[in-house]
Amino acid sequence: MAKKKFYVVWNGHKKGVFTSWNVCKKQITDFKGAQYKSFASKDEAEKASKGRYEDYVGKDTKRIKLSAEELKKIGKPIYPSLSVDAACSGNPGKMEYRGVDSKSKKQYFIQGPFEQGTNNIGEFLALVHGLGFLKNNNSQLPIYSDSKIAISWVKRGQCRTNLQITAKNKALFDFVKRAEKWLKDNTYSTKILKWETKAWGEIPADFGRK
């Protein structure tokens, strides 16, 4: 049985603490600059709801203590930039992805949920969507992903998933085909960079459900 989670919405159609992801999602869907995150307990969620989004997202989940030499070698994130990420409930499961401004976390695009997807497919689609978004806006900003696999797939121009096509995920694979065609038909000079989670914390586009 899945462990119950509590969802805080700092910025959405309605703010507060919610006990269901579906209810939380209604508050953030089609809301630009939505701010939200899941918590393991009601007490944690209620405490967080009284604080700032920036204090709970993208700072503490995967950052580890590194030496000064290691931090210097890694450097700092480039701002302004675009960050993309995906989230998947199960493997395969319902998947969605989005792109945000790396500094302000303003959401620029979101797609899904798609049935029977994987996180790797979502990361791949997010990157291609981000490349198209930047090109359409004549932007030279770099794009960050925390997925080495997705970055390698984009560079190869192919989503190399082992997931099989079914009636449920056909719409998702139609998206994959469109993404692969875009990579084949378009050129871009955008720098695709790896987000260094161990030094910088969660990528800004993280869905906050961990």
Image (spheres, rainbow, N blue to C red):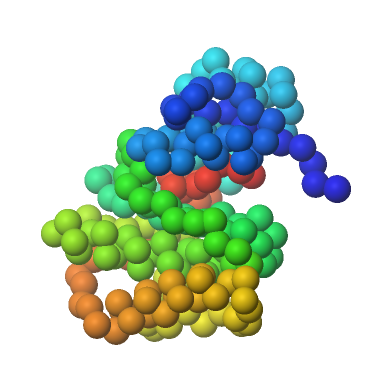
Which residue is depicted at the point 62% across and 41% down?
22
Find residue 76 and report its horizontal and vertical position in percent.
Answer: 35, 47
Q: Position of residue 187 (x, y in %)?
A: 20, 77
Residue at horizontal 54 percent and vertical 56 percent from the top: 113
Residue at the spot x=73%, y=28% of the render? 41
Q: Quadrant of residue 181?
A: bottom left
Determine the residue located farthest toward the right in the rendered image. 1
Is residue 153 in sight in this rendering?
A: no
Please state the horizontal and vertical placement of residue 101, each as a whole percent of the image. Answer: 32, 44
Residue 104 position by quadrant: top left
Residue 19 percent coordinates (x, y): 69, 31
**Quarter of the image that includes the C terminus:** top right
In this rendered view, identify the residue nearer to me: 28 or 41: 28
Q: Residue furthest left?
A: 138
Q: Between residues 150 and 59, which one lies in front from this camera angle?
A: 150
Q: How many marks?
A: 0
Above-or-below relation of 19 to 151: above
Q: Is residue 194 left or right of residue 40?
A: left
Q: Residue at x 51, y 71 (%)?
A: 171
Vertical arrangement, residue 176 with respect to residue 133, above or below: below
Above or below, 47 against 5 in this view is above
Residue farthest to the top? 50
Judged left or right of residue 22, residue 10 is left
User: Along the line of sight, which residue is nearer the eye, 28 or 191?
Assistant: 28
Quadrant hosting residue 115: bottom right
In-image side of 69 versus 21 (left or right): left
| Residue 42 appears anywhere in the view | yes
